[in-house]
Amino acid sequence: MIKKLLLMVIFLISGFIYSQTQYKRINSSKLKQEREIKIQLPRNYDENTEKIYPVIIVLDGDYLFEPMAGNVDYYSYWDEIPEAIVVGVNQAQTRVMDSFYDNQTFLPSDTGANFFEFLGMELLPYIDSNYRTSRFSVLAGHDLTANFINYYLFKDEPLFKAYINLSPELAPEMENWLVESLNTAQSKKWFYLATATNDEPSLKEGSELLDQQLKMIDNANLHYKFEVFQNATHYSLVAQALPKALESIFSPYRPINQKDYDTEIVNSGISPYDYLIDKYETIENNYGLELPVRLNDFLAIGKALEFNQRWYDLEKLGELAIDHLPDTMLGTYYLARSYEESGRSKKAMRTYQNAYGQQEIAFITTDFMLKKAEKIKEDFGY
């Protein structure tokens, strides 16, 4: 276990060598001062000039930026989440003033109101103007700042889609406001809440009471996740919660795995092809990302279609593979298999033969395809 943790730490540290971290000072008219921010750009950001990225803004950037940036770099390296632009807002000397709310209205006031406007009216537009961003943005905070990020949910059209609450120090009425806002949300929202068994008692109790209310909400637009980390403290829970939060928010993005295959695809009764189309439409609708279908996902869906003998859908998968991987044999193979199993043997033979000169891919080789064609020729005497 220790060796695995050490390897992960080494990987996270080395990831910063390949990712790009920038340190900037933004002159804010709302705050009437400069603010320090850190920006980690994805690997190969400069080379991928057409690619756009979600934005993750991290309050308490003095200590939350590095663990968030490291996790984003690590998980996106393995394509478990999309690559993202991570922005840390340093608040070492200002977090109490930045999180200030009125003692009567319990809403951001004075320095808190100014900071609220800085994030929404200055920082986020600055990132959108200077970097290639998608329409999906995440906001994360810890105790005081975790409470603060939730105020954005009370706007008619919230600027942020996802909220990571790490042991929030909830203001009075915040629980009721959150329940009302998330219960009536008209667009998709992601809300992650975490505490720990050894968290500050009042914060743990507040999080658990909030969870009791939020888990009762019946709103298809709300994606809610609550976790209590065993034996963790108010500070150590951060290291465990950040990867879980990212997994929860971006779960539809990840490639199809064995669990998905067994429970949602091959034995579900729905068409695996429809599952694939819906998956990539969900990625685009949720995160604003037009993602090419991964080879892994093609292979999983193709296997399921063959297992369930859905030959017409396999033909559609072949056409889709030709669109996404036009120079490879993948689409040709799926088309030929669908023709072969649906009684169009001569067309299948010719399609297998058409693979000659195309790029080999996965298990599909030139020799494999020509042998399939030859077998049909022998069987039917063509």
Image (cartoon, helix red, strand yellow):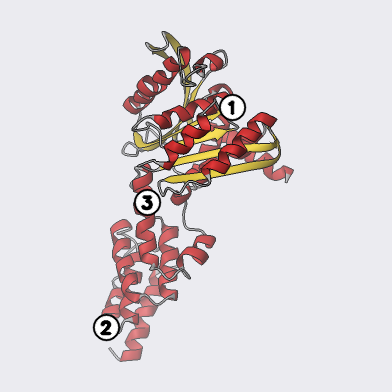
Kind of residue sitting beneath label 1: Glu
**Residue 381 numbered mark, or none:** none
Q: Work out whether mark 1 precedes mark 2 in sequence or the reverse, and give the earlier one.
A: 1
Specify whether residue 255 is in view: yes
Per the image, the residue denoted by label 2 is 346
Mark count: 3
Is residue 296 left or right of 291 when viewed as pictured? right
Q: Residues within 10 Å of mark 2 (few under 14, many from 20)?
A: some
Per the image, the residue denoted by label 3 is 282
**Residue 169 numbered mark, or none:** 1
Q: Residue at x 57, y 41 (%)?
A: 211
- Tag 3 and tag 1, C-beta contact below 8 Å: no
Q: Nearer the viewer, residue 225 or 245?
A: 225
Image coords of residue 225 (percent x, y): 54, 44
* Cα gap from disc 1 to disc 2, whole angstroms: 70 Å
Q: Residue at x 35, y 90 (%)?
A: 379
